[in-house]
Image (spheres, rainbow, N blue to C red):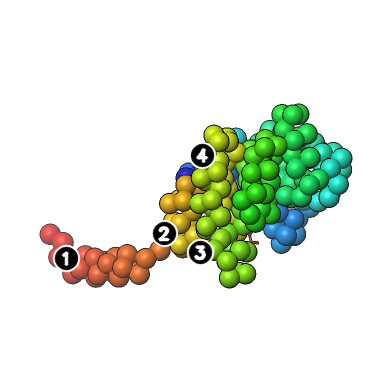
Amino acid sequence: MQFFVDTAETDAIAELSEMGILDGVTTNPSLVMKSGKNPRTVIAEICRIAAGKPVSAEVIATEADAMVAEGESLAEIADNIVVKVPLTWDGLKACDRLGRMGIRVNVTLCFNANQALLAAKVGAAYISPFVGRLDDLGLDGMELIHEIREIYDNFDFPTEILAASIRTPLHVTQAALAGADVATVPPAVLHRLAQHPLTDKGLAAFLADAAKIKSD
Ligand code: E4P
């Protein structure tokens, strides 16, 4: 499974990129707003840091023609831009048209299997089902990943399943088991993937014993 980082914080992206565990980046208007930077400037910076890796940048237009124009403009920022459009009727039209222009599209804000089926039909490069936001409603967000995996496999759709709205390390494990192609994970959750109390306890014991070793 590929790891994308879900942030517009360039320091975090640079650290993960240097570690070699970064396969791509997703942003959305809320994450860009939190970065406090000009949207095009921060997206361009992210594209440089994650050179050669897909960087999703989301349109804010809501009508198909305007989404296509905004998508074309975003795609001019760098070769690794993936244009993100919402899963609305106009978003599906824009996805189809951008795809025909050779621009890769990530269809976002997906909350059910039929939406994912439509995104695959219009040639989305990625579908982004939001696991955590479904869980927030008391539903089983991960079940949606299983459903989409089965449907895409039934018909050999090449659209990649990008598990989004990942909130916990358990979500990451479950997305991998469900066969998601990608999990986009906030930096703080990525850090937590490496943590285990028994690792900390074991390391403390080893270091304590090492300090007792007499040197020759
Ligand atoms: C995905 O691309 C979205 O940016 C993101 O995963 C949304 O996560 P949230 O529901 O935690 O805001």
* Earlier-in-chain disc, 1 versus 4: 4
* Earlier-in-chain disc, 2 versus 4: 4
* Earlier-in-chain disc, 4 versus 3: 4
In the picture of the structure, the residue carrying the numbered disc 3 is 168
Q: Mark 2: give few (<14), some (14-19) or many (20+) Cα within 10 Å.
A: few
State whether residue 50 appears in this view.
Answer: no
Q: Amino acid at mark 2?
A: Ala
Q: Secondary structure at mark 3?
A: loop
In the picture of the structure, the residue carrying the numbered disc 1 is 213
Which-is-in-front pick, marks 4 and 3? 4
The residues bearing labels 1 and 3 have C-alpha atoms spaced at a distance of 40 Å
In this rendering, would 184 be left or right of 67? left
The residues bearing labels 2 and 4 have C-alpha atoms spaced at a distance of 31 Å
Q: Secondary structure at mark 2?
A: loop
Q: Secondary structure at mark 1?
A: loop
Image location of residue 164, percent across then percent down: 59, 54
Q: Amino acid at mark 1?
A: Ile
In the picture of the structure, the residue carrying the numbered disc 2 is 194
In this rendering, would 12 be left or right of 21? right
Reply above or below: 57 against 212: above
Image disc number at residue 56:
none
Which-is-in-front pick, marks 3 and 2? 3
Image disc number at residue 153:
4
